[in-house]
Image (tube, coloured by chain):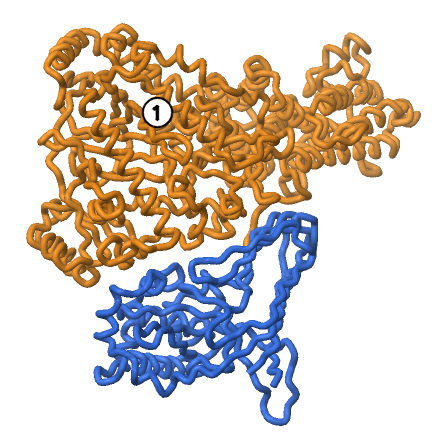
Amino acid sequence: MTAFEPEHRARLMQWLTAQQAGLPVLYRELQQQLRENAAGFGTVSSPQRQLDPLPLLVSELDWRQLEAGMLQRQKLLQIVLADLYGPQQYIRPDLLPAEAVFRSPAFLMSAVGLVAAPADWLPLFSLDLVQSTTGQWQVLRDHALLPAGLGYLVEHRLAFNQLAPVQALDLPKAQIACFYRRLQQSLQDPGALSATAPALSGLWITSVHSSHYFEQAYLANYLDVAVVHGADLTFRDGALWLKTLTGLKPIAALLRYQPDAQTDPLELEPAAGGCAGLLQSIRQQQLCCLNPPGSSVLDTGVLQPFLPALCQALLGEPLLLAQPDTLWLGHPEQLQQFLAAPTRFHLRRISSQQQFVPASLEPPALQALLRQLQRDSADYIATESLSLQQEPCWQPGSGNYHAYTSLRLFSLHNEKLPGMVLPGGYAQITADPLQLQSGESSGLQRVKDVWVLADRGLTASLLQSSSGALDLSRHSGLVTSRVADHLFWLGRYNERLNQICRALRTALSLVNAGTGAAELQDVAPLLQFCRQANGLAGEATDLDELLQQLFDPAQPGSLFAILQALLFNAQSAREYFAADTWLVLDKLQQALCALPALQQQDPALLLSGPCLRQLDDIILLQTALYGLSNETMSRTQALRLMDLGQHIERGLQTAALLQAVFVRSQGAPRASAVLMEAVLRLADTVNTYRRRYRSQLHPLAVIDLLVFDDSTPRSVGYQCLRIQRQCADLPKLAAQPGLSAEQRLALELVTLLQLTEPQSLFDAEQGATPALGLLLSQIQHRLKLLSDSITLSYFNHAPPSSSWQSF
Amino acid sequence: MRYQLSHLTRYQYQRPIANSYNLTCLQPRQLPWQQVLDVQLKVTPMPCTQYSHVDLFGNQRQFLHLLAPHQDMTVQLQAQIDVHPRQLAAQLGDGLSLTDATEHRQLTDPVVALCRHASRNIPLLADAAALWQQVYRADLSMLQNVALLNQLIYQEFQYDPEFSTVVTPIADVLQHKRGVCQDFAQLAISCLRSQGVAARYVSGYLETRPPPGQPRLQGADASHAWFAVFDPRLGWVDFDPTNNVLADVQHLTLAFGRDYADVVPLKGVLQGIGEHQLQVAVDVLALD
């Protein structure tokens, strides 16, 4: 640590000494806090960060230099980017040689002329610094594409403030909330859309399956902006719109994690994850992107060798922030300089972004590298390797130790507001200084919070108390169509799995009860149902074969395929579930995986007690899932969609089951009493039936209970009423009077049941009349139409579509 | 020469498509040797929004958004174009030598410099560079050497429309020694760029004349492509390796780019399922 005023230094040493005793506890609590935060987002699997209990401290004097230097660098880079994608007058051999910059694949020709004002090319800037042994901060890397840290550092600061309030208060550290408020302002008021349409802003995540999803979702939550994905966006009338359950909402600004080349499949790479028309909406000045595609050419480091000269030429002053000597080897003198001492540098290839560390190569390998390099030296950039200063750190086991750290800072500067550097940062710790400088990170991250010891306004104020001002708007109930779609299908798949497991459990108990031909005949309709429920091919006759198919993970219609679909949908809507839900899903997966293991030991075991107990477990876990969703999810449209999915599926499958059992082809035997009882047990209605009818089994009574009686939670009638209620509360999309398409379908379903005379469904000999088959088919048909209609109105906002293709 | 040009692209979809986004590069260039007198771009069904912008190479691009469900989309370019002779064949010897041209590279315009580097479709392959060594004569100007390369490709590579598609890599073209105009142009560019020479891709049309005594077939022409080389003294000079000629009055210039990917005449992204059928009809009619 350098440049601390003497009295400050004394106070600091005193502070550090005072911390020692508390460090083990603080360390443990910080890690626990981080784990809990991540679990809340359903990202238990993300690579772990370990937060050092000793923050990186930056003195006020140092900070003032860093601040001024960073803002100068941002301004310079803004001018350079605007020129590179505009007049290109600085693309000159003495300033920024075309030979270097055009080799970079990050230069996107389609981004030329995208925005005009230099500040719009890089409103949000971040850079990585290290401290050399002389104590000087040196710039390692610039970032236009938002790197990790902006969300983590809020999490770190909150954790410190919660767990170590006294220690934290001891030092006058700058608060960071002001920066996030400014970021919010930049996102909410980009000045692009008219004031009449209050536009949303979004945080564009890469993928819900990415290891950085937690940070991105956490940051979106903190900034109170929507988490969006390419599939959530659609281009219309020159602007971008967010597809939500309540219709299309204009998006005015995007904070972007999605890589440049994957933002627009029409004009850039034809990859999924982007939104066709994004570049056009920026050209139309309807969308403000932090930062616009094309800007990450600076992330490749290709500009770095030229910045000292560019700064002098464009701003008339030297660079305030030092950077290690960086050579472009297309320049003959710089090439000589490099060749004189190649091991003093590390290398990066412009066209491929490949990195080399000559110091770590054996002489023959180094010679080969140098030969390769001299064939096309203009493709290489050499950066001097620095000797770095170490920072005090603490970890259990080793206690106090010293390690190398890099410091990541963030700054904002746009046309309307003066520049601002986030007074704090995200620091990464490593034992290997070369790794730090080449920017390659391993799995486990050791990180530090960064405190700027500066008296700035309400220095002592805690973030929690100041975060109140951040809640400028709560778009409660704003559910993106993609998330709603996932929740709807989560409901459907969970129910489908449940119905099949129930039918299977019932079928297996029947088989266990006896081995006669009569029993096997009874089991056939149940097996047929299990096969059809998720679309397995073939006829249901052979029990062994069916079981093999159901438990074969490679089968597209197997139980595993359903579970995979269920998990995929749950992960895609992570933020809606509490940590307990993940625990249940995990156990569900384990229970299902235990079944084929049983089979491998001995196929006969599948028909035995352990298998039935496994199925019991699965059904119980699913019930827990229903309960958790009902108890923990807030009563929003999101939950409504999941509920609709569940009950549409239950209605469909129940009708299909009854059809398999009661509607037989001519000449086939009627449903036996054993089978009817099994169906009642399957639907948890044996007791209700016995109370009403004693022990006599009439097909009409069974149908009445499972189709018409709307007080039975598994009857078709109950599903229809519930669906009708939920459809009435769905958001109204069009201003047309009367019922929506979904409401109309629900009304048809309810009316269909009400207008049917149950007695007409069976003849005098208790055989099903054609009317029963017709009724059950009509119900299934309408439920499918309803599912399609919901997809169309609420998820797609467009006529039938399923995928994007390009030609 | 005056031409009436028509370029029709038609997509027929198996199922109705809503939301199709298209980007065209279909506006013939105004150039010192080419005047575009009258140009029309007709799109059916009518796009709900349409925007245009000019790209880095100066090509006019149209962004078309079709929202109403449709099963059939046609985009038709019609233009009347005057093409004047460039008379460059006799001047090739006046150009710089390869060594002198390379020394000038520092002073050129950035867009020229952009054409010295590998691009998405055109990697700089050693095998392509070897073609240059086969023809290079130090006593000739750079452009005269390019003419030799043009001839070499014409002689050694077989024109075979069955062999390649728009995404066939240059390496395959080199290996099998066959391809179409686009492949030959991109191959020549790869070879030239490996020598540090700026070369760009040119998309356009070629007037074809029927064999003597046979009637002209409407719509039987096709899009054509060739390449241009930058000589610091003479500017861009266009070579057509498919026909072993310098591009002249029979060549109508549509657009410039680093490679085919920069100047795809019509590309799109659409939301929908099912297959589509593509039909392209190009007609270049000489009016005088």
Q: Is residue B272 above or below residue B89?
A: above
Spot occupied by residue A239 in the image (x, y as percentages of width and height): 57, 41
Disc 1 residue type (three-letter): Tyr
Left or right of A469, for residue B21: right
Image quadrant in which you'd find residue A745 = top right
Quadrant holding the C terminus of chain B: bottom right
Q: Is residue A485 visible?
A: no
Category of crowding for the residue at label 1, using alpha-carbon neighbours closer than 10 angstroms: few (below 14), some (14–19), many (at least 20): many
Spot occupied by residue A390 in the image (x, y as percentages of width and height): 13, 27
Label 1 SS: helix
Where does label 1 land, which residue?
A: A152
Q: Is residue B116 above or below residue A715?
A: below
Left or right of B280, for residue A79: left
Q: Is residue B5 above or below residue A365?
A: below
Name the residue rendered at 57%, 18% in the picture.
A629
Spot occupied by residue A768 in the image (x, y as percentages of width and height): 86, 29
Image quadrant in which you'd find residue A675 = top right
Spot occupied by residue A728 in the image (x, y as percentages of width and height): 74, 23
Name the residue rendered at 81%, 28% in the picture.
A738
Decide which of A284, A733 is in the foreground and name it. Answer: A284
